[in-house]
Image (spheres, grey):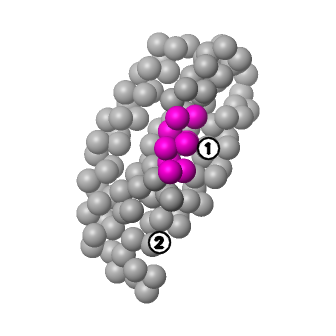
Amino acid sequence: FPCFFNLILFVMKLVAMKKLYTDTYKANIGYMAIFVIVAILIDAFTDPAMASLSDNSRSRFGRRRPFLVIGAIMAVPIFTLSYMPLVPKGIPATLWYGAFHIGSKLVDTTYMIPH
C-alpha cells in the first residue's frame, strides 16, 4: 500500500500543486522549474545514500521499518504545509514551493527507498 499512497501524492503534487501555486499564489513558474531540477539532483544523491544506510542499519525493529515510520511521520507535515503556504504571494510563495518540493523529495526517499 505505500506505493499506492505515494502515487496519489505524486499525482497531486504533479498536477494540482503547480496550478495552485501559479494561479492562486502567483508563484514564478520559471523559479519553480529550477526548484524541480534542484530537487531531482538532490534526490539523485540521497537515494543511493538512503539505500546504503538502510541496508547497513541494525535495530531491534529491523533494518527498514524505522525508516518507513520516520518517513511516514515526516510526510504528514511536509505535504500538509506544502499545500498551505504561510507566506505572501509572489516570490515568497515560490520559495515556499521550492523548500517543500525538496522536502517532499527527501520524505519520498526516506520511506520509498527502504521499502
**Which x, y percent locates residue 96?**
60, 30
In the rendered view, does 107 fall on the left or right side of 48? right
Q: Quadrant of the C terminus?
A: bottom left
Which quadrant would residue 88 be assigned to in this image? Answer: top right
57, above or below 81, in the image = below
**Disc ID at residue 66:** 2
Q: Is residue 46 above or below residue 111?
A: above
Q: Disc 1 to disc 2, how far (Cα)?
A: 20 Å
Q: Position of residue 64 (x, y in %)?
A: 39, 71
Amino acid on which disc 1 is placed: Phe
Instruction: Check disc 2 and give the amino acid type.
Output: Pro
Report if residue 107 is visible in the image: no
Q: x, y percentage for residue 55?
A: 28, 70
Question: What residue sits 45% from the left and 82% below the top?
Answer: 61
In the displayed orientation, state which residue is furthest to the bottom.
60
- Indicate which disc, 1 or 2, sits on the residue closer to the N terminus: 2
Magenta extent: 4-12
> Which residue is labeled 1 in the image?
79
Counting from the top left corner in percent of width and height, residue 76 is at 64, 52
What secondary structure prevails in the magenta region? helix
